[in-house]
Amino acid sequence: MTPYSFLDDYSEGAHPEILDALVESNLSQQAPYGTDRFSAEAATRIKARLGASFQGDVHFVPGGTMANIVSISSCLRPHEAVIAVDSGHIVVREAGAIEATGHKLITVPAVNGKLTPAHIEAALAANGHFPHMARPRLLYVSNATETGTIYTLAELREISALARQRGLLFFLDGARLGAALASHRNDATLADIAALVDLFWIGGTKVGALLGEAIVVCNPALAQDFAFHIKQRGGMLAKGRLLGIQFNALFGERDLYTANARHANAMASKLASGIAAKGYALSAEVETNQIFPILPDPVIAALQAHFAFYVWSKASPGHSVVRLVTSWATDEHQVDNLLSRLGSAVGRP
């Protein structure tokens, strides 16, 4: 049998309602390159979540790396750099995509996966010998982070205030923003985020879409000519309707965006509770849909016969941290199956 995947939150295709929407609209003729009716409706629905004062734009692109490349490169001059934590997605998981656009990444230590004002100030102090050093200009965060933690509203406000005080741009990678907003620890809304950052994006790929992310440009100064940046970076689909239709479904009356994220988080919470109940430690508190348990290497090997997941890092001799990720489509029976096999793998009932 093919191992059941806990590798990521996009191993499945798309939510059935999104597939239905794609099929139902398949033969309707629409304008190309994101100027179709569905993309306009989706943008309107997203803007409705961003607050009455929102004056920016919403654009759709195919994937997350594309969203980061377009967003970051669109607002930096060649000599300007990005401050990010050393575990940040653009640092360790995008094959140097931002550096390939000509922009230096200035990395700082993560605190519980997050960027902190103290580390921002330290990076600014250490990178001020101009014109001999790249000028720090943009702050990069992801919410949820690479370790599944989330930023509280107070933390986002603190970073935003510092960015404005120091003349920096604030950018939020929202690949797993749905999971962050659905977290039991979350106290921020999309409207809060739109008021605090210069630009961010809303991930669709990891919350039930076939593909697609929505870039939200909040700063009017950055919104001008943004479509040109998408086109030059290869992110403008001729059949842009495919993205609009999916986000129209995600942010429609049934609010699949929230419902799908809540299911993923609920399955992660059940998995984490079951693992802890069997006496295994977690390397981090579970706040979203990523779980990082510390397991004996023989137990890991036994589980890999039935489940796919990443061995994340070495914890100690004979023990490793693994990453388990749940999704909008995670089967609760498979969560129970993993917990059952975890117990039997170490001779426990």
Image (spheres, helix red, strand yellow):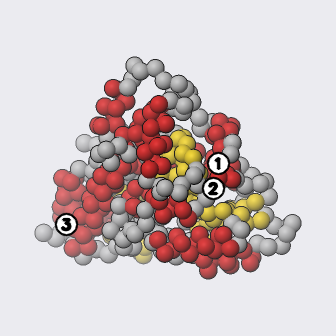
- Tell me whether circle 1 and circle 2 mark residues in contact (CB < 8 Å): yes
Residue at the spot of label 1: 223
List x then y, in percent, for residue 274. Answer: 22, 68
Q: Three-letter amino acid code at disc 3?
A: Gly
Residue at the spot of label 2: 219
Number of residues whose C-alpha sits closer than 10 Å to that of mark 2, classed few (under 14), some (14–19) or many (20 or more): many
The local secondary structure at tag 1 comes to helix
Residue 107: assigned label: none
C-alpha span from label 3 to label 2: 52 Å
List x then y, in percent, for residue 228. Answer: 68, 38
List x then y, in percent, for residue 98. Answer: 66, 53
Is the N terminus in the top left, top right, bottom left or bottom right quadrant? top left
The local secondary structure at tag 2 comes to loop
Residue at the spot of label 3: 343
Residue 276 visible in image:
yes
Question: Residue lying furthest right in this view?
Answer: 131
Q: Three-letter amino acid code at disc 2?
A: Asn
Q: Is residue 55 left or right of residue 79?
A: left
Nearer the observer, disc 3 or disc 2? Answer: 2
Q: Can you say whether 334 is above or below 142 in the image? A: above
C-alpha span from label 1 to label 2: 6 Å
